[in-house]
Image (spheres, helix red, strand yellow):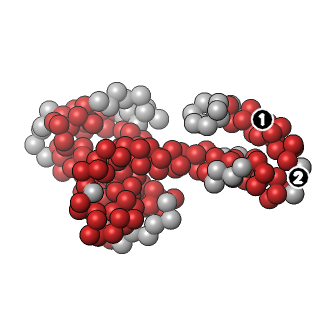
Amino acid sequence: MPLTDHDQKLLTDLLNTESGAWKLFVDRYTPLVVQVIQHTAHSHSLKLNADDAEDLCADTMTELLVRDMAALRSFRGRCSLATYLGVITRRIVVRRLAEHRFSSALGHVNAHHAAVDFASTDNSSVQQLEHRDQVESLLSKLPQEPRQLAKWLFLDELSYLEISQRLAKPLNSIGPLVSRLRSLLQRCDSFPLAKK
């Protein structure tokens, strides 16, 4: 969906720091941001209370303001502004989920001491969560049998032996099944593991 004239004007006013533009922007896009937050949390099997969702929404809006609204200034209008904001929101939520999982794994006492170390591993954690989210989204578009095989192979990282046992098929039949699956997935240009 292309950028609408209304959104173009709103974005232009916002980037030109017109009076009231930020309030209009927040009023227009907060429901979308909250919806993306809830969907992303749900897809990662997390329940958010109202305070958590509000905090993530505030984090998203703050991120849009940093470095003189760099994220909004980099928008090129190749999609709708809503789509663009949805992607930004999802990335922020995934990053926060990675931080939460990391600090939960360390425990409250160790989390503070590991903050410096986490900064260097944050990108890989976020990329893993984003990658998993992307894979799950793409798998949902496949028929049941290839979807299950892809889930076992790419998300659960089962070996061919484990897959053959689950399918009750000979081990030497798994390679051809995986080859057919990869061919099917290569039609999805953005599928991250199809060409491995």
Q: How many marks?
A: 2
Mark 2 vs 1, N-terminal side: 2
The residue at which mark 2 appears reads as 169
Residue 123, position as x, y percentages in the image: 37, 43
Picture layout, residue 184 above or below residue 27: above
In space, the residues marked 2 and 1 are separated at their CA atoms by 16 Å
Residue in view at x 51 percent, y 44 percent: 131
Mark carried by residue 116: none
Occupied quadrant, residue 18 = top left
How dense is the environment of label 1, judged by Cα within 10 Å: few (below 14), some, or many (20 and up)?
Answer: few
Looking at the rendered structure, the secondary structure element under dot 1 is: helix
User: Does residue 147 appear in this view?
Assistant: no
Mark carried by residue 179: 1
User: Does residue 170 appear in this view?
Assistant: yes
Left or right, 27 with reference to 125: left
* Three-letter residue code for mark 1: Ser
Which residue occupies the foreground of this view, 62 or 5?
62
Looking at the rendered structure, the secondary structure element under dot 2 is: loop
* Three-letter residue code for mark 2: Lys
Image quadrant occupied by the C terminus? top right
Given the current orientation, which residue lies at the most extreme right position? 170
